[in-house]
Amino acid sequence: MVIKSSEFTISATKPSQYPNDNLPQIVLVGKSNVGKSSFINSMINRKKLARTSSEPGKTRLINFYKINNSFYFVDLPGYGFSKMSKEEQSKVGNFIEEYLKKCKNISLVIFLIDIRHNPTEDDKLMYNYIINQNLPCIIIANKADKIAITKVDDVVSNLQNNLNPLHDLTFLPFSSERKIYTEKVWEEIENKF
């Protein structure tokens, strides 16, 4: 995909704040610090559109980024971040769930997991939630640059066996660092429009 324009549109915590232009929304979910913001920047070839941090839990709002005036990347706050108070975790969890339930324009959920680790209990809960909500989804095994390139396919296959034994979802490796695998991900995204 050729990216002609990309812009931050709005941060939201409730439905009245979501964009109401009916453009398709591609939603990024995953645990804190798995690389959702870096994924966006890498996919659109910009360094700092989505703010990144080495400190987990920086994204605490639902951030909407309009791409080519034709769809949104939606960056959800990560889950499993322990430094947030229980009250704040609950609040963030509630507005994420409300968004996933009430937003009518979700075309695809991109669920990022860390290629170096087995899915956590939180990952499994999120996976089950996505499946139960019947949301279209692909799984991105991020940080593929952190393991030997010869091991990537086997590790992705093992992650799929662990999380998605039915093999009915697409699993792809990804590396924001090296910007490899982006074309394959764009192919999957474009198939959803």
Image (tube, rainbow, N blue to C red):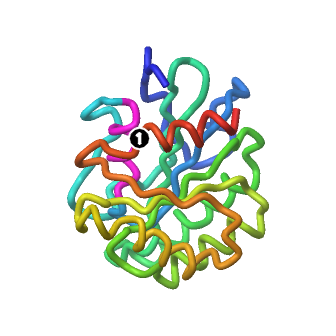
Whether residue 43 is in magenta: the answer is: yes
| Residue ID at (77%, 69%) | 132
Comparing 7 with 131, the one in front is 131
| Residue ID at (52%, 19%) | 68
The amino acid sitting under disc 1 is: Thr
Comparing 63 with 124, the one in front is 124
Query: Percent x, y for residue 126?
Result: 60, 71
* Residue 1, above or below 136: above
- The answer to which quarter of the image holds residue 131 is bottom right
State whether the magenta stretch is mostly helix, strand or loop.
Answer: helix
Quadrant holding the C terminus: top right
* Start-end of magenta stretch: 35-44
| Residue ID at (52%, 75%) | 123
Total labels: the figure holds 1
The residue that disc 1 covers is: 182
* Residue 97, above or below 37: below
Q: Is residue 43 left or right of residue 108?
A: left
| Residue ID at (56%, 18%) | 69
Q: Is residue 19 left or right of residue 87?
A: right
Badge 1 element: helix
Q: Is residue 88 visible?
A: no
